Amino acid sequence: MTETPNAAGEPSADPVVDMLGITVEFPGVKALQGVDFRLFGGEVHALMGENGAGKSTLIKALTGVYSVDAGEIRIDGTRMSFSGPAEAQDAGIGTVYQEVNLCPNLTVAENILLGREPRKHGAIDTRATRARARDLLRRMGLHIDPDSVLASHPIAVQQLVAIARAVAVDVRVLVLDEPTSSLDADEVAELFRIIRLLRDEGVAILFVSHFLDQVYEISDRMTVLRNGTLVGEYSTRELDRIGLVSAMLGRELGTLERLEHQVSGHRAQGDPATPPLLRATNFGRKGSIEPFDLEIRAGEVVGLAGLLGSGRTELARLLFGADRADSGRVEIDGKPVSLRNPRVAIAKGIGFSSEDRKGEGLVADLSVRDNLVLAMQAARGWARPVPRRTADELVERYVEMLDIRPADPEALIGNLSGGNQQKVLLARWLVTKPRLLILDEPTRGIDVGAKAQIQKLVTELAAEGLAILFISAELDEVVRISDRVVVLRDRRKIAELDHPNVTVDEVMELIARGAGEREERVAS
């Protein structure tokens, strides 16, 4: 165990949070086994581990979402037993999740003080609510109009509003669960400014992220979990990245390096001389993405690169029929197709794994089995249910193939880690035997081991002849995994790179050069 001073000075002498021997069990699964965890005031503490390691379970035990089967939780030395999140909040624990859980139709001020509004003569005092929210935003150095509607702001601002809501009470502990997954570099810098401000005021901050560079930039200490057990507690400055990843994986980096080598060694399987599986010509939608040309051949991975807001998801949604184009045409196997809705796209062999796992992908209250066969059932129509034996065989096959944990078809999908949820989404489309699979941020918010597994799976699927459109905010990932890279900026295609030695610097230079230049095609 270690205690080290952080940038603001010494951490509090005694832990604000002391979790001792925490065990949490679900039917057939021991999510946590005797885990100890300490969190001090005035520090940023990173909670690290692979998907399925128990991070989310530990957070939910701390915040009253889950009850513990064994062990105890002490806040400021007092043993606590939370029956729900409200009691945890009353104890000074605030939580901000990856998906912002606020009311987009309300104002910023109303969201910050929802349920805690000042009252006058028994009614909500709107003026006082606005004034209190403005004072809190000013204290955090945020220039956000408290009267503005939350939905009018980008995700990054909504994330900051969620933090303001969490600290609106006398917060002692702030839990940030993947707060940067949807933010660009400038937005991350602003978030980190707020984190440091709160840390310097003595708040204990629990930070969960799969971005290792960010963890090393912002955290003072870290705790590593693996398979529901405690690996260790470390000072960030004393544990290098190789040591951290080895602790998370429970093995040396040889396996991960082999996966990376296999991914990097993949080359296009499609013959450029053969007709494309899909050809889009002058395809676009006003206000969404400018008309573009794109060809995708069987057996190749085409990467979409660009900053947040560049039009990557908008392009993907058009090709899946989730949004309807108002210009251009699409051909599949040389024949015109009207992609007027997702059902047409699925019938033509197109699958789409959305970046929004929660809102557009998973049905949290259904089992792994039901989520996995959902697309196949939709393709068959509800009058022709998938036979139970067929479903069982498919689920068993893909749970094993993708190493989905726990390997329990009846487990609720909402109880799985983000990486395992992502694997179920991939499996859902693979069972439909698609010809083109569109993957929008398939590795966002998952650990390095699961990320390498998914990247390796993508290259293997391409080697078997599947066409893949791969979207990621991480440029190095796009460059490493793709046979061709399409570059977007300001919702238009600005370049296409199809030579074998594409670099991240080359892509970044094209993005930085900006719109207004004619589209480039750089070939070997």
Image (cartoon, rainbow, N blue to C red):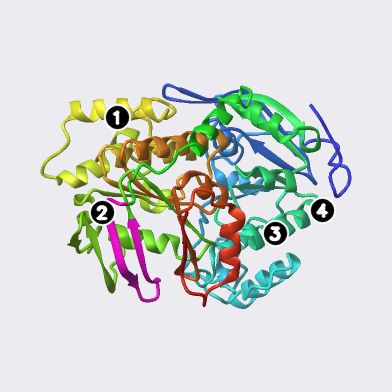
Q: How far across and down, in percent of the image, does residue 136 sit?
A: 70, 66
How crowded pointer 1 is (Cα within 10 Å; few <14, some 14-19, many 20+) is rated as many
How crowded pointer 3 is (Cα within 10 Å; few <14, some 14-19, many 20+) is rated as some
| Closer to the eye: label 3 or 4 | 3
- Asked if marks 2 and 3 touch (Cβ < 8 Å), the reply is no
The mark that comes first in sequence, 2 or 3, is 3
State which quadrant residue 242 falls in. top right
Do we see residue 6 in this rendering?
yes
How crowded pointer 2 is (Cα within 10 Å; few <14, some 14-19, many 20+) is rated as some
**Pointer 3 residue:** 189
**Cα distance in 3D space between marks 2 and 4:** 61 Å
The mark that comes first in sequence, 3 or 1, is 3
- Give whichever of 503, 305 is nearer the camera: 503
- Asked if marks 3 and 4 touch (Cβ < 8 Å), the reply is no
Residue 275 disc label: 2
| Residue type at numbered disc 4 | Asp
- Asked if marks 1 and 4 touch (Cβ < 8 Å), the reply is no
Is 19 placed above or below 8 here?
above
| Residue type at numbered disc 1 | Val
SS type, badge 1: helix
Query: Which residues, given as a range, are shown in magenta?
Result: 273-295
**Cα distance in 3D space between marks 2 and 3:** 46 Å
State which quadrant residue 461 falls in. top left
**Cα distance in 3D space between marks 3 and 1:** 42 Å
**Pointer 4 residue:** 200
| Magenta stretch contains residue 143 | no
Q: How far across and down, in percent of the image, does residue 378 sit?
A: 21, 46
| Magenta stretch contains residue 281 | yes
| Residue type at numbered disc 2 | Pro
Residue 395 disc label: 1
- Identify the residue at image location x=54%, y=42%: 84
- Dominant SS type (magenta): strand
